Image (spheres, coloured by chain):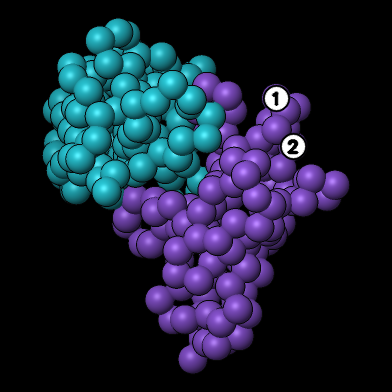
Chain colours: A purple, B cyan
């Protein structure tokens, strides 16, 4: 069985400041982990994925995430938030058949 | 690359109407496509897994006779909401996964979703 928990339902940051979105997972085997972003009334866009090749994963738009097995975490970060980063972010764990389990999502608000 | 097109983007129709939603992988072959439903301010809920050339696999609680899925080719899956009622109003999103022998680490690529409103 697997599950994913996003620790913050809502994050508010000022433009130009760092962003941290927290995610913890539970899996009985080495998981595949993903971060997706969803803008209003849109589908999901893949930001990055972890597949055991490297613990620090770099994604698009300046985002990166670090896989920490000891903490069962896969937090998403960005050094400097941009207004266009305002969106909903989903941490996702995939099983061996490719079925995805979504976290509840974190709403990011960026203020000028 | 890995573009998924979903059509239509928005549908408004009367109760009792059947509505078909198309999901196409434009630049890759997708053995498997997935259909999700998303309620306002909530996460995605998997409805069914659509496999090319075989019957779809539905998640528990999803009525297969209500939500008909057809995956006729490696680039097209359709979801038909039959005899739609107001409670079927929702945001429906499809995704497709690249045809590959290793499923677990291949990401799913999502369409832009269909906003279905039943009056």
Residue at horizontal 70 percent and vertical 25 percent from the top: A1
**Relative height, residue A6 to residue B12 (above, below):** below
Q: Which mark is residue A51?
A: none
Q: Which residue is mark 2?
A: A26
In-front residue for pair A92/A67: A67
Answer left or right for B52 relative to A68. left
Disc 1 and disc 2 in contact, CB within 8 angstroms = yes
Examine the rendered structure and indicate whether residue B41 appears above or below residue B79. below
Horizontal and vertical percent for residue B94? 32, 36
Could one spot residue A111 in this view of the protein? yes
Instruction: Give the letter of the chain under mark 2.
Output: A
**Residues marked 1 and 2, same chain:** yes
Q: Quick one: label 2, few (<14), some, or many (20+) residues within 10 Å?
A: some
Residue located at (48% from left, 25% from top)? B102
| Disc number for residue A1 | 1
In the image, A26 versus A54, the foreground residue is A54
Relative image position of residue A13 (x, y in whole percent) = 59, 81
The chain letter for the residue carrying disc 1 is A
Residue A37 percent across, percent down from the top left: 45, 58
Farthest front residue in view = A53
């Amino acid at each position: 069985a697997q599950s994913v928990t996003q620790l913050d339902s809502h994050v508010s940051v000022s433009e130009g400041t760092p962003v941290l979105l927290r995610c913890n997972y539970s899996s009985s085997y080495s998981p595949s982990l993903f971060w997706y972003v969803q803008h209003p009334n849109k589908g999901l866009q893949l930001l990055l994925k972890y597949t055991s090749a490297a613990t620090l994963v770099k994604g698009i738009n300046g985002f990166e995430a670090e896989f920490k097995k000891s903490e069962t975490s896969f937090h998403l970060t960005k050094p400097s938030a941009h207004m266009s980063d305002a969106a909903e972010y989903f941490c996702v764990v995939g099983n061996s058949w490719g079925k995805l389990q979504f976290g509840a999502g974190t709403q990011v608000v960026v203020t000028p | 690359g890995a573009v998924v097109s979903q059509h239509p983007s928005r549908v408004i129709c009367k109760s009792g109407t059947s509505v078909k939603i198309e999901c196409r992988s434009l630049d890759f072959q997708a053995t498997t496509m997935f259909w999700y439903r998303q309620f306002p301010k909530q996460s995605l809920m998997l409805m069914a897994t659509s496999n090319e050339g075989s019957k779809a696999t539905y998640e528990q609680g999803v009525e297969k006779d209500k939500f008909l899925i057809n995956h006729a080719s490696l680039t097209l899956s359709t979801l038909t909401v039959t005899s739609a009622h107001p409670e079927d109003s929702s945001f429906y999103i499809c995704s497709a996964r690249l045809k590959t022998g290793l499923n677990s680490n291949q990401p799913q690529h999502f369409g832009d979703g269909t906003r279905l409103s039943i009056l």
